[in-house]
Image (cartoon, grey):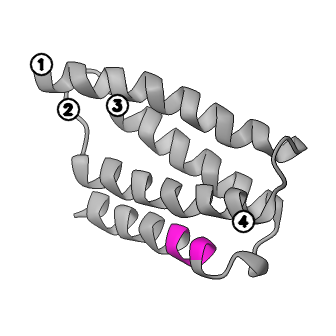
Amino acid sequence: MFAAVRSNILVLVGGMVECFPSRFEEENVITSLNICLDTLDEQLKQKGKGPSFVLVAGAIKCLDGLLMWFDRTVPAGGRSWKYPSQCFYQFRKFNLTCLNCFLL
């Protein structure tokens, strides 16, 4: 149950950032982005038990909203584009880990 609550909070944060981008500063979005990436890392690298897919789905939905903020507010090639690029790099690593979960 805790995973579902945490997942819904992440989805809410991502949705708020996506719908109201002018209300959020860069540091808030980057903090939220780091929380999402840490959540994915924590869930997909657990030893001894599988990830909570509810929480993984919530973190991915939150990332969707956060990346929309970067798309709308940061000029291409700007300093802040390093964070979405790190996000895509991490997601590629998570994707491989996630495939391994299904193969086990």
Looking at the rendered structure, the secondary structure element under dot 2 is loop
**Residues at circles 4 and 3 in contact by the CB criterion of under 8 Å:** no
Q: Residue at position x 75%, y 63% from top?
A: 28
**Which residue is the site of mark 3?**
44
Q: Is residue 74 left or right of residue 30?
A: right
Residue 17 lies within the magenta run: yes
Q: Position of residue 39 (x, y in %)?
A: 46, 44
For the residues marked 2 and 4, what is the alpha-carbon distance in whole angstroms? 35 Å
Please report whichever mark, 2 or 4, sits nearer to the chain's N-terminal start. 2
Please report whichever mark, 4 or 1, sits nearer to the chain's N-terminal start. 4
Looking at the rendered structure, the secondary structure element under dot 3 is helix
- Please, what is the three-letter code of the amino acid marked with disc 1? Leu
The residues colored magenta run 14-18
Identify the image quadrant of the C terminus.
top left
Q: Is residue 74 left or right of residue 64?
A: right
**Which residue is the site of mark 1?**
103
Identify the image quadrant of the N terminus.
bottom left
**Which residue is the site of mark 4?**
72
Q: Position of residue 47 (x, y in %)?
A: 28, 21
**Residues at circles 2 and 4 in contact by the CB criterion of under 8 Å:** no
- Please, what is the three-letter code of the amino acid marked with disc 3? Leu
What is the crowding at mark 4: few (fewer than 14 residues within 10 Å), some, or many (at least 20)? few
**Which residue is the site of mark 2?**
50
Name the outermost residue toward the front: 76
